[in-house]
Image (cartoon, rainbow, N blue to C red):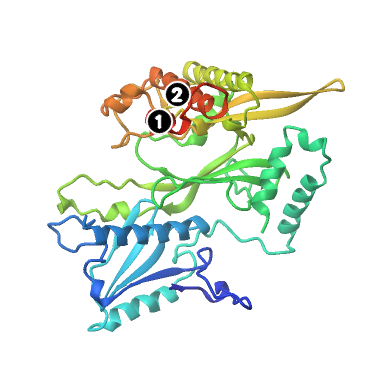
Amino acid sequence: MALYRNDDQPKAVEGKPLRPRWDRMALYIEFKSYGNSVKCDPFDDRTTHPNENPAAGRESARGQLIAYAAAMFARQQRTHGFSIIILGEYARIIRWDRAGAVFTERLNYVARPEKLAMFLWHFAHLDRRQQGYDDTAELIEEDSRLHNMMKKKIADGSKMSAKDKDLPEAYVLEYFKDSSSGATSGPTRPRYFLVGRPHFTAPGMTGRATRGYVALDEESNELVYLKDCWRVDLPDMTREGDVIQLMNNEGVQCVPTLVCHGDVKGQCTSTQKHWSRDAGKPNPFRPHQHYRLVVQEVGCPLSDFKHSEELIQVITECITGHADAFVKAKILHRDISAGNILILRTTVDDQGQTSVVTQGLLNDWDLSKSVASNNDGPRQPDRTGTWQFMSGYLLQTPWKSHDLQDDLESFMHVLIYEAVRYLSHNCTDVGGFVWHFFD
């Protein structure tokens, strides 16, 4: 069951039952029967007991609520959200954001109905921003100027000839087409980008919640790549855009070119503020700040390589870019993975002679760290990075700091992963090898 704003109510289609609209609901409600009110309660009010009760029924109910919250956040532009779970004669109200969740004690709404009624009354009178909608993302109305601008860019891709579709830039228009189907002066000013569905969405409810979009820059009418995420906002954590700007200024090769970036004002998580000092454990919740980054290049996944020579070339160039960043900008990437190495194909016209140039692009510098400072200590309490591609020593030694040699080993793991999955070889059990070696 869900609550919807008046302008977002699902409309019935003849012959089809109404279904939940995760892209429109303002608040969702989960019901558990009276007989299951205790064993299906996902949380525990006892201060001497962990809030996340490990009992099987409670763990399952908790996972269900998290999955529902993740579905709502994945299909909407949200800063936070609310839900209610009904447990027989009891209820809990939950507030979600990218750092975690805060929940009330069990409320007996049968004995004290005014508490739940008061919450619903107040919720209904909140504006969209207070209900958790991101007011910096606006739905584009059909037949508006911006909608027609997007349609024209899609039409440009549809009009390509068969020969044109073989050009390396064609995939950018295809990405934008697929995602769209179905002024202030000074150094800081708003920029506007038109997007469809995300090209990439990180799974899960909490964390950085990264989404990637092939976006249309309203200002230049060029297709660019927009990264929307909730960065960890801790001391010594440098924003990715600042890192890319530094590398661009230092002439680092094979890295993205910054268009613009910035924190979304007033949009940060609050769950971490509710951790009780009486819990007896360090606060496990990290503050997250909503952040957007736009770069010029729209790359292809590494798995789109055409032959082994191109695979080796792209990885080699990314190693060169990695060395450039380390030497010129004093930056260590610290998250080398198959997903962070892209292929950039561009068409070059030299005096009437057209040729295709392939280049490696080392992406996703949000976990990078300056090696110029003397601070070798961890900035976050947990090991960060893509563990399938981490060096063996990092995995075996959790307290070890991440060094240059760890990144270089990760490049080797990426090469093995791509070669075993996509090239000819004598391995008879690819799935088994990938599982045992990487997972």
Nearer the camera: disc 1 or disc 2? 1
Q: Which residue is mark 2?
A: 413
Residue 293, position in %: x, y?
A: 55, 41
Q: Quadrant of residue 91?
A: bottom left
Residue at 34% x, 37% y: name it.
235
Q: Is residue 183 visible?
A: no
Front-most of residues 87 and 244: 87
Residue type at numbered disc 2? His
Label 2 crowd bin: few (<14), some (14–19), many (20+), radius 10 Å? many
Residue 50, position in %: x, y?
A: 18, 55
Rendered view: 282 above or below 330: below
Total tally of numbered discs in the picture = 2
Q: Which residue is mark 1?
A: 438
Residue type at numbered disc 1? Phe
* Image quarter in which the N terminus is found: bottom left
Q: CA distance from mark 1 to mark 2?
A: 9 Å
Farthest-out residue, right: 352
For the residues bearing labels 1 and 2, Cβ distance under 8 angstroms: yes
Rendered view: 126 above or below 245: below
**SS label for mark 2:** helix
Residue 403, position in %: x, y?
A: 37, 20
Rendered view: 181 above or below 243: below
Closer to the N terminus: mark 1 or mark 2?
2
Residue at 26% x, 77% y: name it.
34
Q: Is residue 30 visible?
A: yes
